[in-house]
Amino acid sequence: MNKMDKILEVKNFSVSYDDKKILKNINMYIDRNKITAIIGPSGCGKSTFLKSLNMMITEEKGAKIFGDIFFEGKNIKDFEVENLRKNIGLVFQTPTPFPFSIYKNMTYAPIYYGIKDKNQLDNLVKEKLKLAGLYDEIKDEINKSALSLSGGQQQRLCIARELTVEPEVLLLDEPCSALDIQNTIKIEEMLKNLSKNYTIIIVTHNLAQAKRIADKTAFFFDGELVEYEDTEKIFSNPSDEKTKKYINGIFG
Ligand SMILES: Nc1ncnc2c1ncn2[C@@H]1O[C@H](COP(=O)(O)OP(=O)(O)O)[C@@H](O)[C@H]1O
Ligand SMILES: [Mg+2]
């Protein structure tokens, strides 16, 4: 089967919290196997948007959604939530390893989904840790607590752990905001590499990061999608005054 180039379609999509409109009639497509950055001032709705893409938003009290999102052509409302979130994984700002060994963090979901064979599990752990650029650093410590890793390693572990369920899309909400520049660069290199096989959507307040890694960039402001363009274009020649002001650091 030919896979669609536009892996996600967001159509007339709005979210309100307790009747206050937070996202306002968003329309956009997301390209398969590319990196899309979401930028915009604090409170403009970036996290709400990300949480909407895998229906995490429905866990928030008081949230109401309007409009539709299609994943590979199918309305996300028609997916079983567990299956949707297996396909579209979300990684949070602060690393959230489980308080077990690295190995157990990595095998938790695969075992839940029925993989029992030890060899198969070992190979999966190795493959995904390699993809996350972590294997060489920790291969002798795989039975140590995940909490003994540095912050940057924990974040890469959380991304590797998401990969164990073979998602199509990875959503990352400011994954580097707690990391120093060296660790940030490692994550960026990993994401560039992952984008060959996965679709990545990253919220970042770090404009230089969006510039470095994103193919496309979407600028949100006050719940609206103001501008969505090739990253190169949005940073060199934005069409909208608000985008211009934001990328020149005038607000946000
Ligand atoms: N669970 C919630 N209940 C009520 N309001 C919320 C909730 N989550 C977020 N909001 C509000 O929605 C707006 C957008 O928040 P958010 O999506 O977190 O913005 P961003 O990630 O761009 O900083 C903010 O005004 C925030 O206060
Ligand atoms: Mg946020």
Image (cartoon, helix red, strand yellow):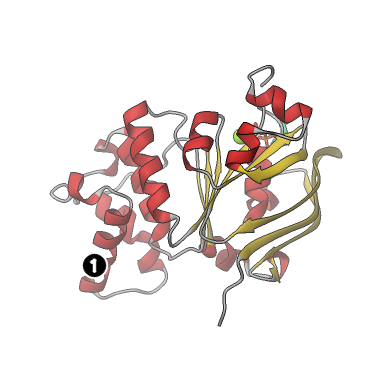
Between residue 80 and residue 234, name the one nearer to us: 234
Would you say 150 lies left or right of 208 here? left
Residue at 32%, 30% in the rendered image: 182
Farthest residue to the right: give it.
19
Would you say 221 lies left or right of 19 here? left
Could you say which quadrant of the image residue 30 lies in?
Answer: bottom right
Residue 26 rendering spot, x and y as whole percentages: 78, 48
Residue type marked 1:
Asn
Farthest residue to the front: give it.
237
Residue 45 rendering spot, x and y as whole percentages: 70, 37
Q: Can you say which quadrant of the picture contains the C terminus?
A: top right
Examine the rendered structure and indicate whether residue 15 appears above or below residue 53. Answer: above
Could you say which quadrant of the image residue 119 lies in?
Answer: bottom left
Residue at 55%, 35% in the rendered image: 204
Between residue 200 and residue 80, name the one nearer to us: 200
Q: Is residue 3 visible?
A: yes
- Residue under circle 1? 123
Farthest residue to the top: give it.
250
